[in-house]
Amino acid sequence: MSTLVTGAAGFIGSHVCHRLLDRGEAVVGIDNMNDYYDPALKRARLDQLLPRSGFRFRQADIAERETFDALKGEVPIRRIVHLAAQAGVRYSLDNPRAYIRSNVTGHLEVLEFARHLDTLDHLVYASSSSVYGGNTKVPFSEDDRVDQPVSLYAATKKADELMSYTYAHLYGIPQTGLRFFTVYGPWGRPDMAYWIFTKAILEGKPIRVFNNGEMWRDFTYIDDIVDGVVSVLDARAEGSPPHRILNIGNNRPCKLVDMIDILERLLGRKANRVYEPMQPGDVERTYADIEKMRQAVDFAPRTDLAAGLAAFVEWYRTQFPTARLEQGSASG
């Protein structure tokens, strides 16, 4: 029996594949290798997976029914980790159809595939902290109302949760939706703030700090995220219907300017900060209540932001050797 991982060449997906393979499991990975960001990074992640025993890969689009028709009968699938999605809040303002295709149509095709699998034990899928929209009550709880999204990306993720609940109700498919909170670390996404800031600081370019610096994020390190994803995958959702939503975050929000301070110390250079107003679709604060996740799988994030950013900077140094980092602390 195998575990199907969609978005296998993505940031979280590739790390989850490695963890499952480390445990001796067979993994079937799917990714369309799109160009939302440089596909070379996706290929580099995939190059780390392809030689591994037990890993099989198919380049395909989850929004195409034929993708899953081709999988039927090829290899028995016992579990699914559905991480493929069109990510990014600001990108959704200019490319809304990409979000409907990948996050709504794609999610539906995964659900249709799952309901015809006699061998399926559990489907774990990616939701997002973005569903909380402009909520001002913190920390964000799974019991909070989430019917006022402030971006199309958030709306598609809430739609995924609703569709999954319906399929759990109608067909008894055990499912867990995970609301991810600002995942970061080595092999991450170049559209995320910590990567953008690192690159700009090293190149001596200005960084844009939105909402005049009044921004907080619940930064969650990739290893902690993978611990949670795999633990949840192992703990099948029960109930009637067998569907649950869980926050997966660090439970320790950090102000964005404090994150920049840490990067300055790690890089040995000062950032040229340009303060700007809030961007459309963005939110001021994210903060995860993870009590339900603790109760479900004893989830306990271990990596603080300074240690996680240090690991990212070290990885960045090895991947981009022309951007040599100065040692020591920033002056001033």
Image: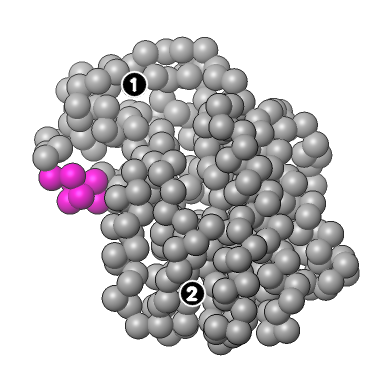
Amino acid type, callout 2 = Val
Amino acid type, callout 1 = Ile
Tag 1 near tag 2, CB within 8 Å = no
Residue 28, given in percent of the width and then of the height, sits at: 49, 74
Q: Is residue 67 left or right of residue 267?
A: right
Residue 152, given in percent of the width and then of the height, sits at: 66, 34
Residue count near mark 2 (Cα–Cα under 10 Å), binned few <14, some 14–19, many ≥20: many
* Label 1 vs 2, first from the N-terminus: 2
Q: Secondary structure at mark 1?
A: strand
Which label number is shown at residue 6?
Answer: none
Query: Where, quadrant-wise, is the C terminus in this rendering?
Result: top left
- Gap in angstroms between the C-alphas marked 1 and 2: 39 Å
Residue count near mark 1 (Cα–Cα under 10 Å), binned few <14, some 14–19, many ≥20: some
Residue 223: tell me if it is visible: no
User: Which residue has dot 2 on it?
Assistant: 28
Span shown in magenta = 314-321
